[in-house]
């Protein structure tokens, strides 16, 4: 998903699209047809490993790519959540049976993208839970969507999803305690074992910053913050208030001082060549959990509300603004 000619489409973008358009259906008479179109694209681009899931990366020419035709959990989880939202918004008696499609997708996620013993979101259906380099304990913090997992439990009647929510929140609290007690920041990727989880070394999957608070973990204040607001789970609340309090103090209340990535001690990982709303908007959701941070919330909201940057940054910013403005709802 990009406005660049020739750029690939990713399942993450399809998930974002279904969620956003369904949440904003009251503002667009064509919302349902747009969602159905996104779902048709999903149907046309399934993973070659578990066909219930989506191929995570589709090149512009749609040519098969054996190295990339597998799944990524984040796109699948948002697609499933969006399907449950669509069922709540329009029902499932029209052209698309959203509820049945959600159940099929959720069964695929649970069987192929969740660790059987860890109960943690794995990186995709390409992960063998027992392999050495990527296993069921290798997880991406931005895939920790406990509010989604609670909705999946309600939508399927399967309490295994509550185990996934518990595993992510418990691990978030452990990682903050052991590796970021002063900041609450989480790394992009966590590896290790149940007894010894730790931030990954550089270049596990994407970049030298894989073990730092980068362009994956930047979504965590939004993901865990939304769960804290909806579920009032004390683990989610503790996780987001820790990082929200730290960033407010570290920037002296000025959102323009938010850097594009930090190590877990709070030191910027790169010079601030360009400010981005991507790292700011999720902190607005986190600030909602603390009534004493109203001034900080107002400052972040005012800075990001009119910012336009591109697909990834704007998709995350918009979803954060939907939460902050009270326009996000759960299925």
Image (cartoon, rainbow, N blue to C red):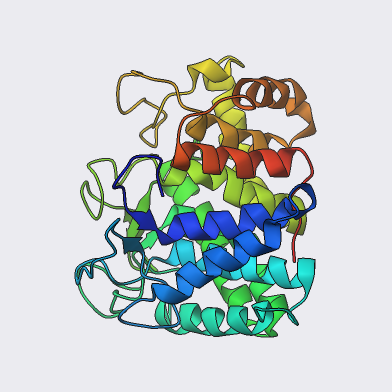
Left or right: 106 in relation to 135: right
In the foreground, 117 or 19: 19
Residue at image coords 65%, 33%: 284
- Where does the image place residue 249, in percent across and percent down from the top left? 58, 21
- Quadrant of the frame with the C terminus: bottom right
- Where does the image place residue 308, in percent across and percent down from the top left? 52, 28
Residue at image coords 75%, 59%: 231
Residue 215 vertical position relative to residue 61 in the rendered view, above or below: above
**Count of numbered labels shown in the rendering:** 0
Quadrant of residue 287 within the rendered picture: top right
- Where does the image place residue 121, in percent across and percent down from the top left? 45, 68
Left or right: 149 in relation to 63: right
In the foreground, 237 or 127: 127
- Where does the image place residue 111, in percent across and percent down from the top left? 45, 84
Report if residue 223 is visible in the image. yes
Quadrant of residue 4 within the rendered picture: top left
Residue at image coords 69%, 57%: 31
Residue at image coords 45%, 57%: 12
Residue 69 vertical position relative to residue 171 in the rendered view, above or below: below
């Amino acid at each position: 998903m990009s406005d660049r000619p020739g750029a690939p489409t990713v399942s993450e973008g399809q998930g974002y699209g279904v969620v956003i358009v369904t949440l904003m259906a009251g503002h667009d008479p064509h919302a349902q047809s747009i969602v159905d179109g996104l779902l048709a694209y999903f149907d046309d681009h399934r993973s070659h490993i578990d066909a219930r899931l989506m191929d995570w990366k589709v090149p512009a020419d749609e040519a098969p790519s054996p190295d990339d035709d597998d799944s990524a959990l984040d796109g699948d989880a948002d697609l499933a959540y969006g399907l449950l939202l669509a069922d709540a918004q329009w029902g499932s008696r029209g052209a698309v049976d959203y509820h049945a499609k959600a159940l099929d997708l959720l069964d695929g996620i649970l069987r192929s993208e969740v660790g059987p013993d860890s109960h943690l979101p794995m990186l995709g259906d390409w992960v063998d839970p027992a392999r050495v380099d990527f296993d069921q304990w290798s997880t991406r913090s931005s895939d920790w969507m406990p509010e989604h997992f609670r909705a999946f439990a309600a939508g399927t009647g399967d309490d295994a999803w509550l185990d996934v929510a518990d595993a992510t929140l418990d691990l978030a609290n452990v990682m903050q305690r052991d590796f970021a007690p002063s900041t609450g920041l989480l790394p992009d990727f966590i590896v290790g074992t149940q007894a010894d989880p730790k931030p990954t070394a550089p270049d596990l999957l994407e970049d030298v910053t894989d073990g730092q608070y980068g362009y994956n973990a930047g979504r965590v204040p939004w993901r865990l913050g939304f769960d804290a607001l909806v579920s009032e789970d004390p683990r989610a609340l503790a996780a987001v208030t820790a990082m929200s309090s730290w960033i407010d103090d570290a920037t002296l209340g000025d959102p323009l001082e938010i850097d594009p990535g930090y190590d877990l001690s709070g030191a910027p990982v790169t010079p601030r060549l360009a400010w981005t709303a991507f790292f700011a908007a999720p902190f607005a959701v986190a600030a909602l959990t603390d009534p004493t941070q109203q001034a900080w919330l107002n400052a972040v909201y005012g800075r990001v509300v009119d910012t336009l940057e591109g697909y990834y940054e704007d998709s995350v910013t918009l979803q954060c603004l939907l939460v902050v403005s009270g326009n996000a709802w759960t299925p």
